[in-house]
Image (spheres, rainbow, N blue to C red):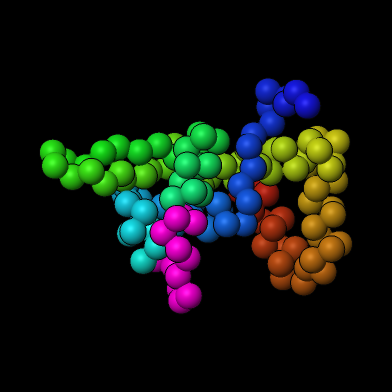
Amino acid sequence: MIKNKKEINTLTKAEMEIMNILWDEAKPMSTHAIIEKYPEPKPAYSTIATFMKILTKKEFVSFRKGEEGDKTFYFYPLITRVEYTRKFMSQVKSTFFGGSVKSLISFFAKEEKLSDNDLQDILSLIKNS
């Protein structure tokens, strides 16, 4: 299947966990350092290493080698959380709501059963943007 140029690679739940760690830490991290951020039971090194290869291939992360004599790879994101969220939501809007922001917001307002306060807060945010 040929991808639309506007489509982005999406992250699986496991990939998103890793990206959130990288975004939260805001510095290049080794595979071991990423694993340390996981709660118990921690994933296997080989599992995270495999995901790092996938994320690199999908162009969400890149890496650099450590200083001289350090063979460790340090991974860092190539896209910010905001950029990913913007592109992902744009794709959701196009795919499920025909590109209509109104339809997207209406859907969430109905599905999430927003309180009157939440709706007022959202209206204020919209008016002030």
Q: Is residue 46 magenta?
A: yes
Q: Is residue 102 visible?
A: no
Which residue ends up furthest to the bottom in the rendered image?
40
Q: Quarter of the image holding residue 75?
A: top left
Residue 79 versus residue 117 in the image, above or below: above
Q: Position of residue 121 (x, y in %)?
A: 67, 62
Q: Position of residue 96 (x, y in %)?
A: 84, 43
Q: Quadrant of the N terminus?
A: top right
Q: Quadrant of the C terminus?
A: top right
User: Residue at 61% of width from left, 47% of height from top?
Assistant: 11
Task: Between residue 113 and residue 16, name the one nearer to us.
Answer: 16
Q: Is residue 17 magenta?
A: no
Instruction: From the viewer's perspective, tell me whether residue 48 is left or right of residue 109.
Output: left
User: Residue at 45% of width from left, 55% of height from top?
Assistant: 46
Task: Between residue 98 and residue 114, name the one nearer to us.
Answer: 98
Q: Quarter of the image holding residue 118?
A: bottom right
Q: Position of residue 110 (x, y in %)?
A: 86, 62
Task: Between residue 38 and residue 41, name the one nearer to us.
Answer: 41
Instruction: From the viewer's perspective, tell me whether residue 129 is left or right of residue 60.
Output: right
Which residue ends up furthest to the left in the rendered image?
68
Q: What's the magenta bit mostly, secondary-structure-wise?
A: loop
Q: Is residue 84 visible?
A: yes
Specify start and end residues of the magenta stretch as a single range. Answer: 37-48
Q: Quarter of the image holding residue 66?
A: top left
Task: Between residue 26 and residue 55, name the one nearer to us.
Answer: 55
User: Residue at 71% of width from left, 55% of height from top?
Assistant: 123
Q: Position of residue 103 (x, y in %)?
A: 85, 46
Residue 42 versus residue 53 in the image, above or below: below
